[in-house]
Image: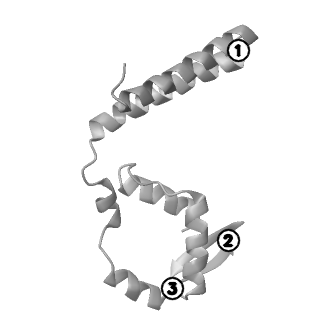
Amino acid sequence: MHGYEMIQEIAERSGGAWKPSPGSVYPTLQMLEDEGLIVSESEGGKKLFALTDSGRGVAEEGPQAPWEEASRGVDWEALGEIRQAGMGLMEAFGQVWKTGTKEQREKALAVVNEARKKLYLILADED
């Protein structure tokens, strides 16, 4: 399995609660390889990783499903609503930015900046 596949697998198993970045996965893979817990080989331009016998032993000693801990207590319905709202905002902003006039872009930027400020005011219990 290559690193990007691992990122996708972790995200899938955790229901999206845990999606490590390439900047954290690849250095970790290098460290595990340096410690002799995994080996790598290049295949088709990709670096594939596999556990060594020593790595399997260490994996068997660890927690069975660390992604379950990462997703424990997550309100999946609220998370879906948050993602939908955020993605909708990004899509609308992106559309204005790509197709709008300079004045429309300035207005859109002001709206997003105002929304950000209002969100922080919510945390400060101010209206």
- CA–CA distance between discs 3 and 2? 20 Å
Mark drawn on residue 77: none
Q: Which residue is mark 3?
A: 37
Q: Report the label total.
A: 3
Q: Quadrant of the N terminus?
A: bottom right
Q: Is residue 108 left or right of residue 59?
A: right
Circle 2 sits on which residue?
43
Amino acid marked by disc 2 = Glu
Q: Height in image: 62 above or below 114?
A: below
Mark 3 Cα shell of 10 Å, populated few (<14), some (14-19), many (≥20): some
The answer to whether residue 29 of the structure is visible from this angle is yes
Q: Residues within 10 Å of mark 1 (few under 14, many from 20)?
A: few
In this rendering, the label closer to the viewer, 3 or 2: 3
Q: CA gap, disc 2 to disc 1?
A: 42 Å
Reply above or below: 87 against 3.
Answer: above
Q: Amino acid at mark 1?
A: Thr
Q: Residue visible at 59% across and 59% down?
A: 22
